[in-house]
Image: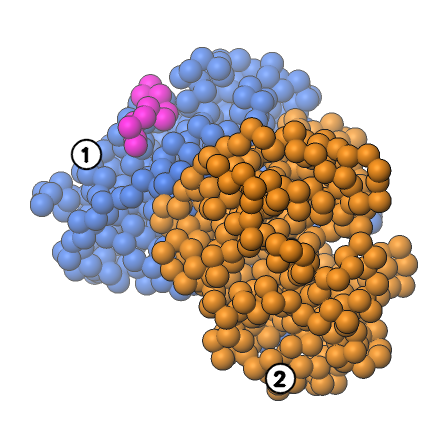
Chain colours: A blue, B orange
Amino acid sequence: MVGAPPPADKIIRFDDGSYFTFPQLRWSVSHFRQLMPTVEVARGLGAPQPLQRALRKDIDSLRFTPLGSKDSMTWEQSLGANYTDGIVVLHRGRIVYERYFGVLKDSGQHGAMSVTKSVMGTLGAALVAEGKLDPNKKVAEYVPELAKSAFGDATVRQVLDMTTGLKFSEEYADPKAEVWQHAAAGNPLPKPKDYTGPRSYFEYLQTVQHQGRHGEAFGYRTVNADVLGWLIARVTGQNVNEYLSEHVWRKLGAEQDAYMSDDSTGTPFAGGGLSAGLRDLARFGEMLRNDGRYNGQQIIPKAAVADIRRGGDKQLFAKGGYDLLKGWSYRDMWWVTHNDHCAYMARGVYGQRIYVDPKAEMVIVRFASTPTAANAANDPTTTPAFEALGKLLLAKPK
Amino acid sequence: MVGAPPPADKIIRFDDGSYFTFPQLRWSVSHFRQLMPTVEVARGLGAPQPLQRALRKDIDSLRFTPLGSKDSMTWEQSLGANYTDGIVVLHRGRIVYERYFGVLKDSGQHGAMSVTKSVMGTLGAALVAEGKLDPNKKVAEYVPELAKSAFGDATVRQVLDMTTGLKFSEEYADPKAEVWQHAAAGNPLPKPKDYTGPRSYFEYLQTVQHQGRHGEAFGYRTVNADVLGWLIARVTGQNVNEYLSEHVWRKLGAEQDAYMSDDSTGTPFAGGGLSAGLRDLARFGEMLRNDGRYNGQQIIPKAAVADIRRGGDKQLFAKGGYDLLKGWSYRDMWWVTHNDHCAYMARGVYGQRIYVDPKAEMVIVRFASTPTAANAANDPTTTPAFEALGKLLLAKPK
């Protein structure tokens, strides 16, 4: 998309769907606002809070062994292997490593994909800690519109931890998967004339049916995050982008506005619509690492961060079928490793990550645009790299 | 558009066209990014440059006589009469007056409408002053794609001053007016299946035909600004939003990113697509008032600002038929009053204004959402109010 105009065969359009295929995706993930309507997550009008720098030269050569491999590789090699667009590492709050590739620059916002869910989960955990959202109440008590859907008799906790039993397939390869109905409902473009389905995220959520029982297994379903977005909006009286701005982004000393895609009724896509600056998400991760305190303020209650760190039910998680994430759990829409550094992670398709390693006092944020959506494709060259870096920083704090 | 979701009869959608009718317009003009794709005019990552305040209490009671009226009214009364969303007055660079109404807040961006043209004209005048754009060259020498259109044999100067002879009607009430073909081409939504017309602003511009001869009369036509946008992109190698960001917005110490709507090929709407913060447009106006120098830097060449201030050909302007703007001229896409304060103005439909009064050392920026598009409807309660305030500040500078 360079030139005035760009060459015809280089134009990426929203409505033909190609924007979300590789390699066009490499451009699209840094330009979602140019493809679709968005709502602002305002940083406010004050001066950003600068991040200190203490760059290290011993990171690129760090070696680790990818999952399922016999041969080791270097950290620097992993950047290319993971189609990295941008990566930043904070140690004790200072930037020790920062790189950009492709079309992303430090002044720019990249799609966070399902990392959005963890941001929403953080807001949800905070509202629980503040007593504004009762985790034991049924969803329908807050959102009566969902009473007849599968969400109606799920608890807020089950939504936060995705242990709801839902008839909702996210098999993108299956054109009949419910995820496509969800996408069609939320698509901000005009509906086709013969379209008779739901016309917004909230309308779609009301149609989701039961499958299995709530509370019996972890089942990763984007719609839980959209329901959480509705819960947040209902109890706070603000759309999630506004609430996120007022209660987090403005307090972080963010250097850029973030934004969210939204449907035709103005509802932000809580399941995956956030785009943000790399360093601003690092500020967000650093705030969590500091028990919710950052930039001189308690932004998220300490109890909420403790709840995320503690993790969810490992047995329920094991039923979710993630072979590469054995022993992990899922809590408040965060992936909790339960490794010896107590690290927890936000994960988005095509390689997006926030990785908080409390023991190493480290936060990593990575934006990427991998050819394969599922993170199982890049976990082998990601998780052990992040763990190895945590060990390095713990051993040699400098 | 308040609620989760908003009530069905309060939802404003892009595709049904209602967003651009009164009263929905009052919301839409502050939320364009939520209705359509946009590109960023980044302010950069540094700290904003604060504007000093020296608020005055003698402005609201200032009396003036609206054009064509026998009875006077107060400045404060004019705010309601003009459906003001936000207004700020700088005197000697300090904020002496600032008010917000409706849905606009100081943290928010409002559609500048055709004020966009004056921003583009400023860039054009700067490129002329820097020798990068020759005002005497034909447009086709820079953009060969326009050779067969009416623009091909127009000079850059004629485009900048809108003295081109074009078959292009902006009569919105006429469904056959060319402005609707222009809008259809630039509309970022998918084209209807039976649509055979141009599919982008640049494609549309190539179809514009001659009517009359270039250089014989002022004729206000939005497409001139789009051609200027193409000229800027061609000689700078950047889209106008990027060029505006790098050469102006980042240097102004702006406190918010601005943005522009764009067509499906990513081309920003140079004729009217800018949305910006009220105080940031005031910084822009103040930069011009200071001969292009602001925030410690020469942002726009002094010669470019002098060219705007000097104005255009009054006789050609008189042929444009603006009864309320007698004695004015049009230069570099600015409206030049030639009043005794040498004021010049950027004007956008529904009441948008930047008003620079060099003699009174005053800059006014107003955002509004009037029921009537044409500014002739609000000029009577606007121009004399601005002039009266210039006289007050000149007489009582405090």
> Tag 2: Cα neighbours inside 10 Å, few (<14), some, or many (≥20)?
few
Question: Which residue is found at the position 42% from the left and 23% from the top?
Answer: A125
> Tag 1: Cα neighbours inside 10 Å, few (<14), some, or many (≥20)?
some
Chain to which mark 1 belongs: A
- The mark closer to the camera, 2 or 1, is 2
Question: Which residue is found at the position 86% from the left and 59% from the top?
Answer: B171
Q: Is residue A302 magenta?
A: yes
- The span picked out in magenta is A293-303
Does residue B56 appear anywhere in the picture? yes
Mark 2 vs mark 1: tell me if same chain.
no
Where B101 sits versus B244, above or below?
above
Q: Which mark is residue A359?
A: 1
The type of residue carrying mark 1 is Lys
Where A34 sits versus B146, above or below?
above
Q: Is residue B295 left or right of residue A363?
A: right
Q: Is residue B269 left or right of residue A281?
A: right
Q: Nearer the viewer, residue A370 or B180?
A: B180
**Horizontal and vertical percent for residue B390?**
61, 45
Residue underneath mark 2: B136
Can you tell which quarter of the image residue B341 is in? bottom right
Question: Which residue is found at the position 59% from the left and 17% from the top?
Answer: A142
Q: Nearer the viewer, residue A354 or B86?
A: B86
**Horizontal and vertical percent for residue B214?**
76, 80
Q: Nearer the viewer, residue B343 or A112?
A: B343
